Amino acid sequence: MRYFGNNIKLFVNNRLVSYTDEGHDEAPVVIFIHGFPLNKSMWNNQIKILKADYRVITYNIRGHGDSDTGNDSFSIELFVNDLISFMDVLRIKKAALCGLSMGGYIALNAIERYPDSFDALALCDTTCRKDSPEAKNKRKKTIERIIKDGVINFAGDSLKNLFTPDSFTTKADEISSVKKMILNTTELSLCCTLLALSSRNDTCSVLNDIKVPVLILVGAEDTITPPDYAMFMHENIKDTTLQIIDHAGHLSNLENPEVFNHHIKKFFDLVYKDQLIIDQTIDKSFLREFSDKIMMLLSFKPI
């Protein structure tokens, strides 16, 4: 049985997962994977745009939002296992993935290990590269600061890196929302996820093996995973489209949602064009049949 709506709770491998599920039963499935240290609510705007034509699912990665942390050591491989188990419980055999930053790391690892489970990828403000020694050291120091000072200072530092300077005057609501997401994440989950990010494997060597269409989106002012990283993936994946989003940093879907949404809608419509045409034909025939029945009722005159 499928449940519709926001903040649905589901047990997957004895662990509670929180997710949102919108759209038609028979529509193509698009699963959104959030970045660190955020949660599924970062995709609310994208759900609104896509749910008329797609079954759109967003979920909280373990330890984020109100998904359980569990007892396993965090890793990108574990997050992929969670994703596949989640799809199995929902009886989703195949889907498109859209992942931002950490969500992109998960998507790339998933397509490497389970290539037959996905129709397409949208990789947003992410990279195939593993952490450099300098980046690992920076994450280690961040963990130490979180343990010593708590989450508040970490949230302030994160916002400066996630958003462009202009957004602090033009995107006050988005910044407030992201800050709330960070503050609602436990110190344990933050530290465990930072360790997982620092120990992730490089996936650049498998880019040439990706056989599905790929959309690469990146904010023009992203300093965490800059456009050069996106260009590298674009040059090494066979079937890719690259779009650089102006007036956006690392959270391009929040800073320039109009442009971001235009590109993902256009991409998924192209990937699923044959299926969408069939769905629209069915809908129109149903409407014609329904209309005919109404006209028959209206024209009926009792004796």
Image: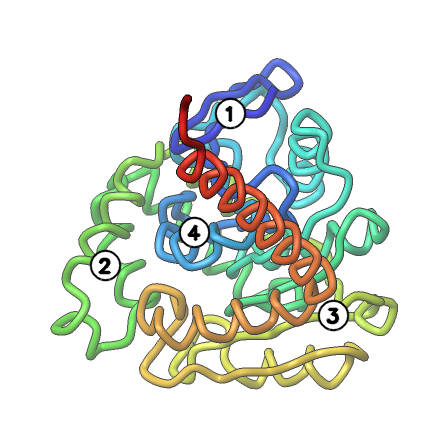
Element marked by disc 4: helix
In this figure, which residue is indicated by the disc labeled 3?
213
Mark 1 residue type:
Tyr
Q: Compare residues 117 and 127 and report the one nearer the observer.
A: 117
Q: Residue, x 43% and y 51% (percent of image)? A: 47
Look at discs 3 and 4 and give the one toward the viewer: 4
**Badge 1 vs badge 4, beta-carbon distance below 8 Å:** no
Disc 4 from disc 2: Cα separation: 16 Å
Label 2 crowding class (10 Å Cα cut-off): few <14, some 14-19, many 20+?
some
Q: Earlier in the sequence, mark 3 or mark 2?
A: 2
The disc label shown at residue 47, or none: 4
**Badge 3 vs badge 2, beta-carbon distance below 8 Å:** no
Element marked by disc 2: helix
Please identify the quadrant where the C terminus is shown.
Answer: top left
- Residue 114 appears in the rendering: yes
Q: Percent from the top left, x then y, of residue 162?
A: 34, 65
Mark 2 residue type:
Glu
Q: Residue, x 63% and y 47% (percent of image)? A: 27
Disc 1 from disc 4: Cα separation: 16 Å
Q: Earlier in the sequence, mark 1 or mark 4?
A: 1
Q: Residue, x 51% and y 73% (percent of image)? A: 225
Mark 4 residue type:
Ile
Element marked by disc 3: loop
Q: Earlier in the sequence, mark 2 or mark 1?
A: 1
The disc label shown at residue 3, or none: 1
Q: Quadrant of residue 160?
A: bottom left
Q: Compare residues 14 and 25 and report the one nearer the observer.
A: 25
Q: Is residue 195 left or right of residue 200?
A: left
Q: Is residue 212 left or right of residue 282?
A: right
In this figure, which residue is indicated by the disc labeled 2?
174
